[in-house]
Image: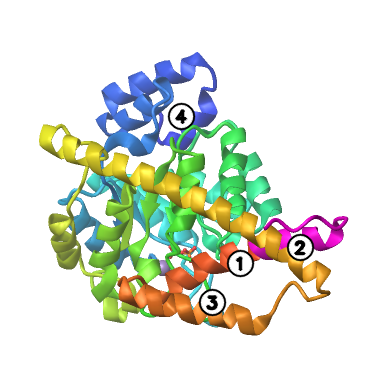
C-alpha cells in the first residue's frame, strides 16, 4: 500500500523497512524515485541534476497564480518549485503569506504536475503543517538562520524525517553561523542538505545589488564542506530582474551546483519582491543561455597550458611569501630603532605616504586601488603587531 506523501512514508517506516516501502512507493508512484535513491544510496536529493534548478514565485499569492506558474515550470528543466507560504517581511503591514491554503495549492501542484515543491519554514508550527501537506523540501530563510535556538528547534523537529533541507546564508556575512546551522540539520540525521547563497545585507549595499554577494564567503563554505550542494539565489542578490542572468552565470562560474530563481506569471504585480522576479518565458531564456562549465577538462592541450601556468603561479606565490617574510624582518628591525629612539609604532603620515605610493604603482600595473589598499592593510597590520611585540620585549641589538 503506497504512502500518500513523503511525510507518511517517513513517519511510518524508520528502519530498513522504510527503504523497502520506498521501493514499493517507487513502483506505484514513479515520481518518488528520487526519494528512494537519496535514502537508500545515501545520495543527496539535490545531486539529480546539474545545475539543479529551483524556480517559482516569491510568495504563493492565489491558487491561479501558483497553478499558472507550475504549468509553465513543469515543461522546463526545473527540478523543484518554490513558493513562500509564510513570508518574513522587514516591516509590518506587508503581505505575510497565505499559510495553510497555500500549502493546499502546492499539494495540488505535486499531484497535477509531478513537480516536487519547497517552501520556507521559520518555526515548528510551520514545519508541522508543511510536512502534513507533503512539502518535499523545506528551506530555512536568512532571517531564521541567524538564530541558533530557532534553528535547533527546527532541526530537533525534523529528526527522523530525513526531509531534504536548504539553508540560506544568514543576513550577515558570518560563515561560521551558516555552517553551524547546516550542521544542526546534519546532526539531526538529515542526509540531503543544500546551502543557498542569497547575499548579505549591508548598511551600504554594494552598487547594483540588493544583497552583497561577497563571494569569498560561500567559497569558504564550499572549501569547508565540499560535499554540500551549493545553490545560488541571483534573485535576492541582484534585487532586479535585469541582473538575474548575469549573477546566475557568475554563480555557475564559481562552481555552484544549482540556482533558485524567483518566477512569477506577472512579476510587476507580485505581492512581494516584484522588482526581482522574472516571467516563465524570461526564465526559459535565462536557462537556455547559461553556460555550464566543468571543474576539470579532458582537453590535453588545455591541461598542458594550465599545468604550465599553474607551475609559474606557484613559484610566484612562493616568491611573494619569501618577500613578505623579508619585509616582516625589516619591520622588526624598524621596531627596534623606534624603540631605542622612543618613537611611536604607528606614524599616520608614513602610512599615508605608503598608501599613496602604492596607489600610484597599482595604477601603473592596472591593479585595482581597493585591492592593493586592502592587501597592504593586512601587511601593515602584521607589521604593527610585530613592532608592538618588539616594544614589549627587552631591547635587542639593531642589525646593520
Ligand atoms: C525568499 O526566498 O523569498 C526569502 C524570503 O528569502 P531570504 O530568506 O533570502 O530573505
Ligand atoms: Mn523573495
Which one is in front, 383 or 246?
Answer: 383
- Height in image: 360 above or below 305? below
Residue segment shown in magenta: 383-400
Distance from Cα at disc 2 to Cα at disc 3: 20 Å
| Quarter location, residue 182 | top right
Secondary structure found at label 3: helix
Tag 4 near tag 1, CB within 8 Å: no
The tag on residue 336 is 2
Of callouts 2 and 4, the N-terminal one = 4
Mark 3, mark 1: which one is toward the viewer? 3
Q: Secondary structure at mark 4?
A: helix
In reply to whether residue 347 is colored magenta, the answer given is no
Q: Is residue 213 above or below residue 32?
A: below
- In the image, residue 373 lies at what x, y percent? 49, 72
Q: Residue furthest front?
A: 400
Is 393 contained in the magenta span?
Answer: yes
Residue occupying image coordinates x 45% and y 64% = 214
Location of mark 4 (residue): 9
Whichever of labels 4 and 1 marks the residue nearer the N terminus, that label is 4
Q: Which residue is mark 3?
A: 354
Dot 2 or dot 3, earlier in sequence? 2
Q: Which mark is residue 380?
A: 1
Coloured how? rainbow
Q: Which residue lies at the image location 79% right of the left edge and 59% below the top edge?
A: 390
Amino acid at each position: 500500500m503506497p504512502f500518500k506523501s513523503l511525510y507518511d512514508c517517513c513517519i511510518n517506516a524508520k528502519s530498513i523497512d522504510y527503504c523497502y516501502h520506498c521501493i514499493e512507493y517507487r513502483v506505484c508512484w514513479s515520481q518518488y524515485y528520487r526519494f528512494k535513491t537519496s535514502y537508500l544510496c545515501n545520495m543527496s536529493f539535490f545531486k539529480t541534476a546539474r545545475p539543479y534548478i529551483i524556480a517559482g514565485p516569491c510568495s504563493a499569492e492565489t491558487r491561479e497564480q501558483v497553478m499558472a506558474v507550475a504549468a509553465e515550470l513543469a515543461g522546463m528543466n526545473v527540478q523543484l518549485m518554490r513558493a513562500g507560504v509564510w513570508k518574513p517581511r522587514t516591516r509590518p503591514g506587508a503581505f505575510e503569506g497565505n499559510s495553510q491554503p497555500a500549502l493546499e495549492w502546492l499539494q495540488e501542484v505535486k499531484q497535477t504536475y509531478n513537480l516536487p515543491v519547497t517552501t520556507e519554514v521559520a518555526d515548528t508550527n510551520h514545519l508541522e503543517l508543511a510536512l502534513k501537506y507533503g512539502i518535499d523540501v523545506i528551506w530555512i530563510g536568512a532571517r531564521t538562520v541567524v538564530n541558533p535556538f530557532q534553528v535547533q528547534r527546527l532541526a530537533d523537529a525534523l529528526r527522523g524525517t530525513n526531509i531534504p533541507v536548504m539553508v540560506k546564508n544568514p543576513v550577515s556575512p558570518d560563515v561560521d553561523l551558516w555552517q553551524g546551522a547546516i550542521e544542526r540539520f546534519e546532526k539531526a540525521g538529515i542526509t540531503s542538505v543544500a546551502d543557498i547563497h542569497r547575499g548579505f545585507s549591508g548598511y551600504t549595499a554594494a552598487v547594483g545589488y540588493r544583497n552583497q554577494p561577497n563571494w569569498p564567503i560561500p567559497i569558504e563554505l564550499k572549501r569547508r564542506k565540499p560535499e554540500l550542494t551549493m545553490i545560488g539565489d541571483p534573485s535576492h542578490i541582484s534585487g532586479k530582474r535585469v541582473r538575474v542572468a548575469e549573477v546566475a552565470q557568475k554563480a555557475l562560474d564559481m562552481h555552484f551546483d544549482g540556482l533558485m530563481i524567483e518566477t512569477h506569471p506577472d512579476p510587476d504585480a507580485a505581492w512581494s519582491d516584484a522588482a526581482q522576479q522574472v516571467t516563465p518565458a524570461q526564465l526559459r531564456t535565462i536557462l537556455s543561455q547559461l553556460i555550464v562549465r566543468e571543474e576539470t577538462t579532458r582537453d590535453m592541450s588545455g591541461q598542458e597550458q594550465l599545468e604550465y601556468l599553474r607551475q609559474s603561479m606557484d613559484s610566484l606565490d612562493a616568491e611573494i611569501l619569501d618577500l613578505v617574510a623579508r619585509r616582516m624582518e625589516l619591520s622588526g628591525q624598524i621596531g627596534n630603532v623606534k624603540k631605542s629612539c622612543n618613537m611611536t609604532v604607528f606614524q599616520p603620515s608614513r602610512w599615508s605616504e605608503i598608501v599613496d605610493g602604492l596607489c600610484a604603482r597599482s595604477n601603473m600595473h592596472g591593479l585595482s586601488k581597493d585591492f592593493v589598499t586592502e592587501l597592504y592593510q593586512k601587511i601593515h597590520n602584521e607589521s604593527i603587531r610585530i613592532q608592538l611585540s618588539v616594544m614589549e620585549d627587552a631591547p635587542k641589538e639593531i642589525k646593520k
